[in-house]
Image (cartoon, helix red, strand yellow):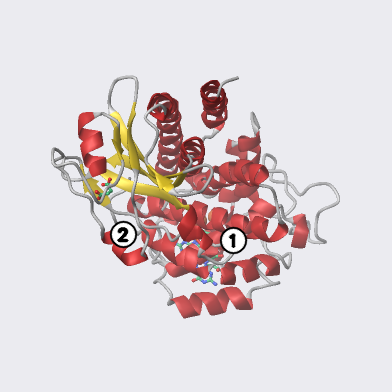
Amino acid sequence: MSHREEKLRKVIELGLIVSQIKDIDLLLEKVLREARSFTNADAGSIYIRENGQLRFRYAQNDTMVQQLPPGKKLPYTTFTVPIDSSSISGYVATHGTILNIADVYDLDEQYPFSFNRSYDDITGYRTRSMLTIPLQNFRGEVIGVLQLINAKDETDGTTIPFAAQDEEIIVYYAGNATAAIERAKMTREIILRMNKMAELRDPKETGPHVNRVAAYSVALYEAWAFKKGICQEEIDRTRDTLRMSAMLHDVGKVAISDAILKKPGKFTPDEYLIMKLHTLYGANLFSEMYSDFDESAAIVAINHHERWDGNGYPGYIDPHTQQPLPDHANEDGTPRGKRGEEIPFFGRIVALADVYDALSCRRCYKEAWSESDVLDNIRSEAGKQFDPELVEIFIESIDTFRQIEKLYPDHSEES
Ligand code: C2E
Ligand code: SIN
Ligand code: SIN
Ligand code: FE
Ligand code: FE
């Protein structure tokens, strides 16, 4: 089989894998990684069209990552570029054409754009060759831009221009990736809409809150998986399901009345009892268990308020009958709380992510806490409210949590 056929076959296989990924962030990561692997690119980024602009959504850079401690990731950054001819990505999005540049510091005079060196100036990285591909759907609409940076010579690793004969394959690949990205965006839209229907608190709080809790959960899981040496394939699979389940952790609040849900002050004990039912309502929404995803969404919904010390809720209970499970009742007939590793792992992860977010932000019933108060609280709850191992991982990952907080601020326009 020729090199070219081999590449083509790989592209087709990848189309299949990519079409199974439902979560947009994971998908962007996969798309970029694979596109880089068959063009042998050192770095790359993906821009997604959003409100008439290109938003820089995701980047990889092998050279920069090698300078970080093992297991650490590049910081999340985000900015927007106008869709016009003033930048490379803007130009490609405007014209819907691929652009293959040998050296962005030495641009052909015919081009209307200039290369923005600010990233290179900050990092010391030298961007040279660049292959920029429009992500175009079958209707011809550009939904984003894929940018591959610094092709590496396969033998000596020096930076070379991108091969002209790779352009056709990468355009084909970009078409498949675009279809998958549109599907994943729709999945996320549907999830956000389900949460909106639940009208959790102020609807402006809902989108950012669920996005943050999902991102924190994934960050905790990834740091844990890295420590345990879990293989990448399993990490990818788990992350996809975890993120979507975490986004839906509170969707059972749809069944709680606004009077309770949006009460501007402290609950009475009776109101709190009703609110606690959101775990069971959430589990019931996914009880048909059509897929792994439904199953894990049910697990997260019912377990995210259990506590490591066994004093959480709802405990061992049948979500339909609301009766304790056989042999799991306390003496007073209430269900026994799950404790320690009896609580499913996803439940323990989302519990920590959810409380971190609840404490860090303002809610209709409380003010935001300072970061040091939040950290003191979480540290002191290790082994009580939270899985102590996860608390340790959380403390080590606090930088990532801070970045996620900036990525999804409250009271901003929702994406
Ligand atoms: P939430 O706002 O997403 O909070 C999630 C969890 O974060 C809470 O679960 C609790 O474990 C923790 N948390 C939030 N605020 C505080 C705090 O000020 N101190 C401490 N120590 N922990 C805090 P919890 O208590 O089971 O509450 C579940 C949900 O019930 C909350 O979700 C919120 O929507 C609602 N809620 C709880 N208490 C009140 C209240 O007094 N008034 C109102 N209006 N809603 C409440
Ligand atoms: C881009 O393609 O827009 C990034 C480089 C630049 O700003 O020109
Ligand atoms: C609790 O943590 O027990 C209730 C939540 C709150 O007081 O805000
Ligand atoms: Fe909850
Ligand atoms: Fe929550």
Give residue 329's position: percent from left, percent from top: 80, 55
Q: Quadrant of residue 93?
A: top left
Helix, strand or loop under label 2: helix
Is 189 situated above or below 44? above
Asked if 332 appears above or below 146 in the picture, the reply is below
The reply to whether residue 360 is in sight is yes
Q: Residues within 10 Å of mark 2 (few under 14, many from 20)?
A: few
Percent x, y for residue 340? 76, 62
Amino acid carrying label 2: it is: Tyr
Place of residue 398 in the rendered image (x, y in percent of width and height, measured from the top left): 51, 69
Q: Position of residue 301 (x, y in %)?
A: 60, 48
The answer to which quarter of the image holds residue 16 is top right
Q: Name the residue under label 2.
A: 119
Direction from residue 339 to residue 187 in the image, left or right: left
Q: Nearer the viewer, residue 21 or 9?
A: 9
Mark closer to the observer (1, 2): 2
Q: What residue do we see at 38% from left, 64% from top?
A: 264
Q: Which of 297 and 154 is in front in this view?
A: 154
Earlier sequence position, callout 1 versus callout 2: 1
Q: In which quarter of the image is the N terminus?
A: top right
Please determine whether, in this image, residue 177 is positioned above or below residue 281: above
Outermost right residue: 327
Residue 305 appearing in the image: no
Mark 1 lies on a secondary structure that is loop
- Residue 71's tag is 1
Could you tell me how far apart the alpha carbons at marks 1 and 2 are, in whole angstroms?
A: 23 Å
Labelled disc at residue 265:
none
Specify whether tag 2 is near ligand 2 (CB below 8 Å).
yes
> The residue under label 1 is which amino acid type?
Gly
